[in-house]
Image (cartoon, helix red, strand yellow):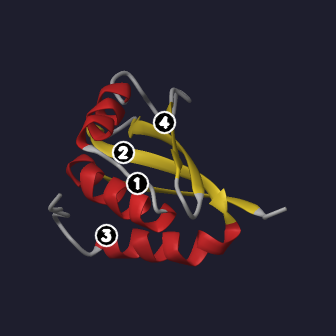
């Protein structure tokens, strides 16, 4: 049985699509725009400090990722907190993704 980890970080809300796209690529999950809009909608009313989270799952060809999303209590809808549960083999890649996203003001994708 594969060991699981939980990894979390915060990011500015305008980076959500870029981060979801990179996570989908890591897990080999076929993410579409409708799912991204669904995740954005499920974020409404969330608050990390009040333990009000939204859940989502990528069941990719390579890995399954379970997510919890919530808006930051102080920054409101400008910042999102994400918790990711997945196989421990992805820990280094998740840390790298977090460092990468912190270096850029914008993360844009082309579908």
Identity of the residue drawn at 67% across and 63% down = 87
Q: Which label is found at residue 80?
A: 2
Circle 4 residues within 10 Å: few <14, some 14–19, many ≥20: some
Residue 52 x/y as whole percent = 51, 26
Which of marks 2 and 4 precedes in the sequence? 4
* Marks 4 and 2 close (CB-CB < 8 Å): no
Question: Tags 1 and 2 in contact by the CB under 8 Å rule?
Answer: yes
Q: Where is residue 61 shown, x and y percent of the image?
A: 54, 59
Identity of the residue drawn at 48% across and 36% down: 48
Find disc 1 in the rendering and name its residue: 10
Q: Nearer the viewer, residue 32 or 9?
A: 32
Residue that mark 4 sits on:
48
Please name the residue that numbered disc 3 is placed on: 102
Q: Which label belongs to residue 78?
A: none
Q: How dense is the environment of label 1, judged by Cα within 10 Å: few (below 14), some, or many (20 and up)?
A: some
Quadrant of the drawing holding the N terminus? bottom right
In percent of the image, x 18 and y 62: which residue is there? 109
Question: In the displayed structure, does residue 34 sit left or right of residue 42?
Answer: left
Q: Residue furthest top?
A: 45
Give the number of callouts: 4
Q: CA distance from mark 3 to mark 4?
A: 20 Å
Instruction: Kindly state the secondary structure of the residue where label 4 is placed.
Output: loop
Label 2: state its secondary structure. strand
- First in sequence, mark 2 or 3: give its number: 2
Task: Place residue 70 in its image quadrant.
Answer: top left
Mark 1 or mark 3, earlier in chain: 1
- Of marks 4 and 1, which one's residue comes earlier in the chain? 1
54 sits left or right of 39 in the view: right
């Amino acid at each position: 049985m594969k060991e699981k980890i939980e990894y979390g970080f915060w990011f500015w809300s305008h980076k959500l699509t870029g981060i979801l796209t990179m996570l989908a690529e890591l897990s080999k999950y076929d993410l579409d725009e409708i799912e991204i809009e669904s995740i954005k909608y499920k974020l409404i009313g969330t608050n990390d400090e009040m333990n009000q989270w939204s859940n989502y799952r990528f069941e990719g060809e390579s890995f399954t990722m379970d997510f919890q999303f919530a808006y930051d209590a102080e920054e409101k809808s400008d910042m999102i907190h994400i918790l990711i549960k997945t196989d421990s083999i992805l820990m280094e890649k998740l840390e790298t993704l977090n460092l990468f996203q912190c270096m850029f003001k914008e993360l844009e994708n082309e579908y």
